[in-house]
Image: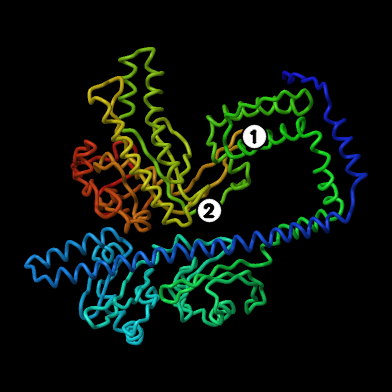
Amino acid sequence: MREAAFIKVKFPIGVKLVTIITLLLLLSLGSITVLVSYMVTRDIQITAEENNFTINQRSASETERTLSAMQSAVLVLLEILQNTADTGNPEAAGLIKRDMDIFFNSNEYMAAIIVPGLWELVNSGYFRSNELNPVLPQQFLDQQTEALRRCTAGETLLLNATPFFRSAMLVILQPFKQEETTHAAAFFFSSDSLSDSYGQGVNTSFLINGTGELLIHPDYELVRSGVNLSTHPFVEILRNSTETRLQTIYTDKDGRRYLGAFQKIMTGNAVVVTAVEYDKVFEGIIATTRRNMYLTGAVLFASIILIWFFSKTISNPLKALTSAAREIEGGRFDLVLKSKSKDEIGALTASFGKMSSALGIFGRFTNRNIALGAMQGKIRPGGEPKNATIFFSDIRNFTAISEKFTGLLGNDASDKLVCWLNEYLTRMIICVEKTGGVVDKFIGDAVMAHWGTAYTAGSPERDALNCVRSALMMRIALYELNKKRKVDDLENPVIKIGCGINSGLVTAGQIGSAERMEYTVIGDAVNLASRTEALNKSLGTDILITENTWNLVGKYLITKEMPQVTVKGKKKPIRFFAVINIKREPQPKPRTLGEVRRLLGIAPPFIDKADINAEERKYKIGPG
């Protein structure tokens, strides 16, 4: 084995370190830890208070702005509709419908606007897309006799309708004066329009109305169950306070201390509350103080004074190396490191640069994200069960295409074939990585990937939907790529693929030997996904999902059920669905399987005559 070249050090760093450490030990004072701890604790508390108050103000301001804009827009709409209706114009009904459609298209979170006895405007698209009954708003108002009375008396109210709708819904009851009569105008809108301002983290923000009813909270289940926080210790404080905004420390019923801030908003006498557990603010400083005590604090203090004299030869190179280490840890290997230092740091920098280059070359031959995850401890050794979604894709007639390359180009065929294949695979990999998937391996022209294994979107349903989205992105990317090619171009032929998707329980882990390992998945769900892909050609489809995947995400998709297939090793026939598109409003093309086939140039199959057992004898189409 060839030994690495020895790099001579002209100015040993050990001499410098001995000098610094000696001076530090002589200057160490135990009392510094107490001083530093006090100062840091005070700074952390001030920062925590400012941060908590800032988050509260930001959430309150955003809520106030959104609600005010919503009120203004609805009141203007009602005035316009009323003026149009009062003109007596024969075309008034059409104009009113036009204005109403324009309003709801521009305010997608608005579900309905009802002024009892005057107007009942329902956003049918909202109720249809959320699978809700459009009569629910009126039924809800029928139960709000007291609230309607208070509104007509001049009070603006903000109510939680989520428990009634079983969907995120808030209601503003706004006095609306028509001639000399005051009506109660009810605005029904999705609380999702405000939820971005109430994200969950160390600081928790939530919205309540004047009666303590919980309107918005990061924990959606609390809102849906209609929780009332009127007896909450901090809510009692803010209800008894004459201040519009305040921050204080309070103790809950379990004895835990919190730093709480509130700000009242104009709409519905509502209040935005933000709280953070007091002890969590100081967890870091308490642990650090306990570990380091007097000696560490003294060393840190003395280092601030003395290390300045050595910063040009030590601090800057170390900072550069630290930054480079973080870049490499994050997966970036294309670093250029230079150092004028002639000591150990200069030698380390040179070696570090060589290591970065070597890692960059290594990263091209393995799954970089998986390697980084294992290095960072996010992927533990061994296997573990995962509810995953598995994806396979394959190029149609790849063997025939490769043979044509050989016959046409001779010795240049291999290079041309690899370039042609890499151009295709590059676009497919982008689609997988954009949706949070993991490319498992390339099997010739085939691609295997999975979702919900090394990384997850939070649930098997979201992982499965991301997988289907990736396949649809591949369809679009391949369509755009093929548009640049000629149908009869033998040197750059059009590519057609089939994609198979299945969801289920798999075993995921690092499989191999001590010298060579790869992160992959195994199990019956993987085999079924592979066999699902093989069915595309016989069924005249490009994306097929199994019933397992359809049960998870079918409600989000436009699909076409295909004939049942009996898979070898399975007693019962399996249902398969061709994926056409994702449901959205307005629904873009393709909207039918026929449109997919015309778009991609797929000939409709003759199911009765199809022989999908020609290669592996694994399937049988039709009833079992």
Residue highlighted by disc 2? 385
Compare marks 1 and 2 and give the one earlier in the sequence. Answer: 1
Image side of residue 410 versus residue 118, left or right: right
- Quarter of the view holding residue 254: bottom right
* Disc 2 residue type (three-letter): Pro
Q: Given the current orientation, which residue lies at the most extreme front position?
A: 180
- Residue 391 vs 228, above or below: the answer is above
Q: How many marks?
A: 2
Image-quadrant location for residue 462? bottom left
The residue at 63%/33% (across/down) is 515
Q: Residues within 10 Å of mark 1 (few under 14, many from 20)?
A: many
Residue 97, x across and y down, in percent: 16, 65
Q: How is the image coloured?
A: rainbow
Q: Front-most of 329 and 447?
A: 329
Location of residue 47 in the rendering, given as x and y in whole percent from the top left corner: 65, 59
What residue is shown at x 21% (from left), y 36% (from top)? Answer: 601
Q: Quadrant of residue 540?
A: top left
Identify residue for label 1.
Answer: 324
| The C terminus, quarter of image | bottom left
Q: Nearer the viewer, residue 31 or 425?
A: 31
Q: Residue furthest top?
A: 411
Q: Residue at x 85, y 50 (%)?
A: 298
From the top left corner, tell me how far across and down residue 607 is, in percent: 20, 44
Judge from the rendering whether residue 529 lies leftward or rightward of residue 513; answer left or right. Answer: left
Cα separation, mark 1 vs mark 2, equals 36 Å
Going by the numbered disc 1, the residue's amino acid type is: Ala
| Secondary structure found at label 1 | helix
**Foreground mark, 1 or 2?**
1
